Image: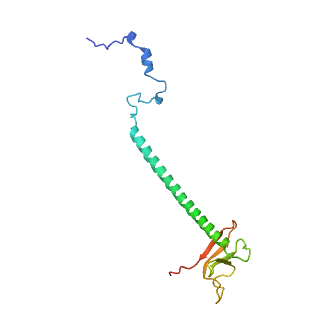
Amino acid sequence: MTKTGKKIDLDQIDLEKMSEMTTENPGLISFPHTVGGAMIKPEDKGRIKGRAVAAMHEQTEMQVKQIYKQMQLLAEQAKAIQERVEVSERIYMAKMSFEPLIGKTYHLYEREDGTDLLSLIGPTEWGRSKPFKQFISSVKLLADHTWEVLTSEPDSSE
């Protein structure tokens, strides 16, 4: 007795259904199409999102720190400008018997009566007679007509 293989009944094969399970370009399908094909696992979306969120937080924290440093610098610059305005107002209220020139250095003193005096003469150039109570600062007139403080009165507590 010879064994014969199982006969295939071609009438029972649904060729349309089988054609849906095949492709002309097997490299483009998202699953292995042969037994020896590479195994394709779906990614853990939670882990991917978690890493993305962590990276996003790190990046935005770095950017916020950078903006904070810039804000500190701007605040320091604004404070310096405010100090120049305050000094400038005091100088413009002081007595001066000349027209100050931009870029030149002058000296601000407080007189015995409490008023201020802007002078061309520095604190070490007066000699024995000093027509002021105290030296306040040496200043330079800037192009915007504010004054830059070059040196200030030495601290009397030293």
Quadrant where the N terminus is found in the figure? top left
* Depth order, front residue of 1/124: 124
* 43 vs 81: above or below: above
Judged from this view, the residue extending furthest toward the top is 11
Residue 139, quarter of picture: bottom right
* 38 vs 94: above or below: above
Judged from this view, the residue extending furthest toward the front is 113
Q: Position of residue 101 (x, y in %)?
A: 73, 72
Q: Position of residue 140 (x, y in %)?
A: 66, 73
Q: Residue placed at 47% from the left, 24% from the top?
A: 23
Q: Position of residue 103 (x, y in %)?
A: 70, 72
Residue 11, quarter of picture: top left
Q: Residue placed at 44% from the left, 44% from the top?
A: 53
* Depth order, front residue of 131/120: 131
Q: Residue placed at 46% from the left, 27% from the top?
A: 26
* 54 vs 96: above or below: above
* Depth order, front residue of 135/115: 115
